[in-house]
Image (tube, rainbow, N blue to C red):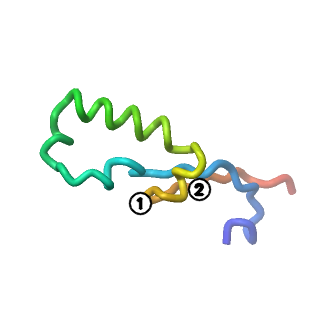
Amino acid sequence: MLRSLGPDSGPRYGIRTVCDQLTDEARKYEPAYYADLERRELALTARHPYPHTARLFQLTARKGQG
């Protein structure tokens, strides 16, 4: 759909790659554990194959030449 509008596709990012795989919801509210979880999410967000295993993904695009 985006290509039909003319933009060039950019990087794809996985969102919630690690967080949604964890079943211990209470630990996610511990500040140190959450900070570590956030670091892991950011480290894996654009690293293959993790964007494909994430619960959600974000596709970025920029206006094409033309």
Please tell me which residue is depicted at 16% across the width and 41% down the height of the picture: 27
Could you tell me which quadrant the C terminus lies in? bottom right
* Residue depth check, mark 2 versus mark 1: number of the one nearer the observer: 1
Q: Label 1 neighbourhood size at 10 Å, few (<14), some (14-19), many (20+)?
A: some
Kind of residue at badge 2: Leu
The quadrant holding residue 40 is top left
Q: Secondary structure at mark 2?
A: strand
Q: Secondary structure at mark 1?
A: loop
Instruction: Calculate the distance from the C-alpha at mark 2 to the C-alpha at mark 1.
Output: 14 Å
Residue designated by label 2: 59
Q: Label 2 neighbourhood size at 10 Å, few (<14), some (14-19), many (20+)?
A: few
Please tell me which residue is depicted at 74% across the width and 58% down the height of the picture: 7
Instruction: Give residue 12's position: percent from left, percent from top.
Output: 60, 52
Please give left or right for residue 45 compared with residue 6 in the image: left
Instruction: Give residue 19's position: percent from left, percent from top.
Output: 32, 48
Q: Which of 24 and 16 lies nearest the eye of the viewer?
A: 24
Instruction: Give residue 1's position: percent from left, percent from top.
Output: 67, 72
Residue designated by label 1: 55
Instruction: Give residue 34's position: percent from left, percent from top.
Output: 25, 35
Kind of residue at badge 1: Arg
